Amino acid sequence: MKVRLPLFLGLSALSACAGIPDPPPGQALASWADRHVINVEQSAARVSLAVAPDDTALSGKARDELSAFAGAYLRYGHGAMILSAPAGSGNERAAAALATQARSALLEAGISYGAIAASSYDASGQTEAPILVSFARFEARAPECAPLWEQDLAHQSNNQPWESFGCATQANLAALVEDPRDLVTPRGEDPRDSGRRTTVFDAYRQGESTHALRSEDEHVAVSDAVN
């Protein structure tokens, strides 16, 4: 038995399709990430070490600050670590001696000798000018997300996402990424470890097993694992 729809139903369906408004002018966005861009800016991380004119050694607090600062540099620092001692100040001689100790503390914390650049800055007229240690880093600025209560999520023409769609994801990414420079360009690859590859190839050439040997304790039957 054939069922025929009334003519007015077919016309109404066509009119509904034809009634979709035109898309907004301009090129459509490729993704929500293009709408909510994370801005990455270069900044400077800095620690200041106080130096009195009669100081002869770094304090324990100063060494702890340098150790933590070195850890931050190893995680997300870029370029050289600048170690600046004051020149022309009343504590210039003491600062020069403590700057040498500060370099040693940074080396002990894992900073390579070539990554530390020594410099000086003009501190004329100052009695107790500090030692400044700094390095370049990058900071991620999260996009501003429009409040959901200001948007009509039920009426989005042409199946376009609402204004703040994906903005929270971008904001979370900006807050969680350890080194925001990774959002600008990928990191370089470390040299491959060819030691294991050489071992496997040598065993293959000699007709030996190429997989790692396992002890009897590492062999577990499925039935034993689920019991």
Image (spheres, rainbow, N blue to C red):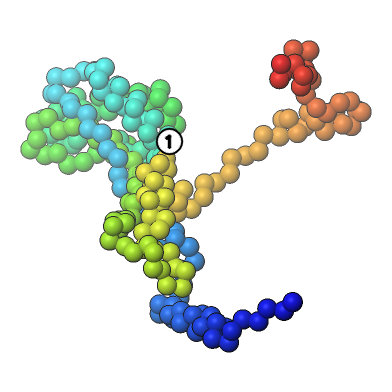
Mark 1, residue position: 75
* Residue 40 percent coordinates (x, y): 37, 53
Q: Position of residue 50 (x, y in %)?
A: 18, 27
Give me the residue at 65% from left, 38% from top.
Answer: 192
Amino acid type indicated by mark 1: Arg
Residue at horizontal 47 percent and vertical 69 percent from the top: 159
The N terminus appears in which quarter of the rendering?
A: bottom right
Residue visible at 37% across and 62% down in the picture: 153
182 or 38: which is nearer to us? 38
- In this rendering, would 203 be left or right of 10? right
Quarter occupied by the C terminus:
top right
Res. 78 image quadrant: top left
The percent position of residue 220, horizontal first and vertical second, equals: 76, 18
Q: Height in image: 38 above or below 103?
A: below
Residue at image location 22% in from the left, 29% down from the top: 49
Image coordinates of residue 173 in percent, x first then y, are 42, 47
The reply to whether residue 1 is in sight is: yes
Quarter occupied by residue 179: top left
The answer to whether any part of residue 36 appears in the image is no
Please say if 16 is above or below 55. below
In the rendered structure, the answer to whether residue 17 lies left or right of residue 154 reads right
Camera-nearest residue between 15 and 53: 15
